[in-house]
Amino acid sequence: MADVAHGAYEGVRPAEVPDVELYHPKSWWTTYVFSQDAKVIAIQYALTAMSIGLVALVLSWLIRIQLAFPGVLPFIDAHAYYQIITMHGMIMVIYLLTALFLGGFGNYLIPLMLGARDMVFPYVNMLSYWIYLLAVLVLVASFFAPGGPTGAGWTLYPPQAILEGTPGQEWGIILMLSSLALFIIGFTMGGLNYVVTVLQGRTRGMTLMRMPLSVWGIFTATVMALLAFPALFVGVVMMMFDKLLGTSFFMPSIAQMGQHLSYGGGSPILFQHLFWFFGHPEVYIVALPAFGIVSDLISTHARRNIFGYRMMVWAIVAIGALSFVVWAHHMYVSGMNPYFGFFFATSTLIIAIPTAIKVYNWVLTLWRGNIHFTVPLLFAVAFIVTFVNGGITGLFLGNVVVDVPLSDTMFVVAHFHMVMGVAPIMVVFGAIYHWYPKITGRMYNETLAQIHFWITFLGAYAIFFPMHYVGLMGVPRRYYELGESHLSSSVTLNHYITIAALIVGAAQMVFIFNMVWSLFKGKEAGGNPWRATTLEWQTPHTPPRHGNWGKELPVVYRWAYDYSVPGAAEDFIPQNQPPAPQGA
Amino acid sequence: MTIIVLFLAVVSSIAAWWLWHQGLTSKPWLEEGVIGDARAPGMSTTSPSKVGLGVFLVVASTLFMLLISAYAMRMPARDWLPLPIPKMLWLTTGLLVLSSIALQSALMAARRGSLAGVRGGLVAGGVSALAFLFGQLVAWRQLSTEGFLLAANVANAFFYLMTALHGLHVSGGLVALGRTGAKVWSDDQFELPEITASVELCAIYWHFLLFVWLILFALLMGWGSDFLEICRQVFADP
């Protein structure tokens, strides 16, 4: 790989793709609805994910109102409360974040950043979106099913998930499990596309080590998701069997409403293992694309090459591999063998090393950079701070002795919202603002974006910082009502958190308004407003047309981070700019 | 869960070995100009479909390995009553072996350029795979008439679940095989390399299905239980 040649070897992709290789849409329907163009699919994924995410946002309002002012909303009884928290968690983790990062950003960025015309299997890619949409619709249908959606908690632990007494045990749980199974099938179709496109669809000169870190993050996360989602699939299918066909995979001998059921011998712990074998990698499936994207945002907006590119790549891969051997740290209180707890605590703490490398490298990239305080950069920096905060409480919880007393308290809620809620959402916003000019051809409104950033960033801290303290006081999570509490400061804090949450939620309307308004009234952005080096900013048209590139695919001559190169005419050199002639 | 962790260890060492040969230690910031081939050396001729199938096979293997992990974890419970495996399964195993051989012969015929050979191989492969599925259904029927119902014991449940998931994968393969067949029969104006590529994908998938089935069959026959017992003792799997 080290030999540098200015010609092309045999076996290199032809620069020109014969026209027949590309599927050409023939009507409005196949251009915008049943489209096989990865960019359209990306936008479909993103809009669907954000729409269902808005539902989850409203649900979080309801949770907070109930916690701070119990009884104010008369329709929230204990059953409704459990349904609300379950759907909030499930939607946010799977249907919003996973779908948005991999289906949304993955589809948009992978072909453009690698200089490909499209994904390698466009038809399967289209199918992936429509199955995802079906999964979302089945999920939404459960709100209207008799008995409402499931209230089993987002972890869906058996036996309670399918027994009477848990809301939605008739239809809700069945729809939930079906929706998850559909989601996994749809994702697998998309995931195969992302992986094979990265492996086989790169343009000439785009070696793996020249890929932008966004692609590295999305690629590694996709590989992880392809290996982790089957665990959820197996768990979901088995639970479906237990629920509908009366098998005893997970169901122990148990009585329900005074009646002994025919179940016997099943192992609820088996489900926990399967669930968390998926569930822990899921954290990094959301985090790794965020890691990658944030690297690109920082490098571009601080006009500085990414510090330690190789280390960043290795750290992404190492985190991906390590995250498969830490799952049982979610199960310290399940009665497991203490030696297992010891093993999983160790592996959990080891994962902090590659993560810390990444944080140092981001900070060192900013160090003495020519920082432009654009909105994407603000969100990127907010991500670093938030991720460090959430990560450090993760070190606490990774230790068995600290985790056991803190289990099922609001401390855990605060921890995972910081690390996999707020932090990735910061990247989502930063990335949307960053690529908005490319996707729409217009610039967003800067003032509105700044307002949105400051309310969201400060507001998120107003919500989740005090929540750690509430948790340390011992306030449990998943309680519908705290009753007569002697911990009066927890009551005041709950009021405060709720008010902050309502404000932050409302501030998202500013974001939506900005996106819609700028679509029509925004300034023309031009092809490369951020003066960025990566290929997606070098397309002949903005927004890029079907096929992405003109007649010829770009050829890559350099890595993705040639910012502020000494002696260069501009402070950035695009990846497809040929090297200066020798001796010039 | 030890089994799936071991499996993923194997997958990740292969991935690590592959990544290592991708120039992961290169210093991209020092290298200007077109660097050779964007693809890995030796992989440049592999078609995206073949790579895609390879990735899919890893995903499907993960699914079956997880199922086997669950099987191994659930088996030590006291309520586990092993069920008598129908003799039928020996026959169906033979049919699946035949199916795999037939597709391999179709592939070799395609490489020779013999259209008749391809057609014969595809028909033989498809028919024996259908017969395999039919045989599995007969085996289900025998078991359920003998009273080994799905919900009666978890060992039965695992039997039905594993055979059903494997059968679904075979059915999916038959769809792909049908599409390949349609290509071979539709008109005489087809490109031989294209046919060869399709037949090759089918053949690879069929060998995979056979391999998975042999493992599942061994497990269901109880041949693997000693091995699982050793694993359990060594790792004290909860």
Image: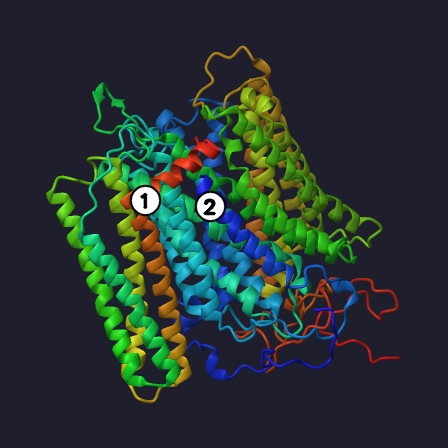
| Badge number at residue A94 | 2
Q: Compared with residue B191, is residue A206 higher up or lower down, i.e. above or below?
A: above
Q: Indicate the quadrant where residue B136 lies.
A: bottom left
Q: Report the residue marked by disc 1.
A: B223
Residue at 37% across / 30% down in the picture? A268
Q: Compared with residue B119, is residue A48 higher up or lower down, i.e. above or below?
A: above
Q: Are marks 1 and 2 on the same chain?
A: no
Q: Secondary structure at mark 1?
A: loop
x and y, in percent, of residue A349 in the image = 64, 34
Residue at 57% across / 18% down in the picture? A490
Q: Is residue A425 among the parts visible in the rendering?
A: no
Label 2 neighbourhood size at 10 Å, few (<14), some (14-19), many (20+)?
A: some
| Badge number at residue A165 | none
Q: Report the Cα–Cα distance between label 1 and label 2.
A: 39 Å
Q: Compared with residue B182, is residue B27 higher up or lower down, i.e. above or below?
A: above
Q: Is residue A153 among the parts visible in the rendering?
A: yes
x and y, in percent, of residue A71 in the image = 42, 22
The C terminus of chain A lies in quadrant? bottom right
Q: Is residue B222 left or right of residue B15?
A: left
Amino acid bearing label 1: Trp
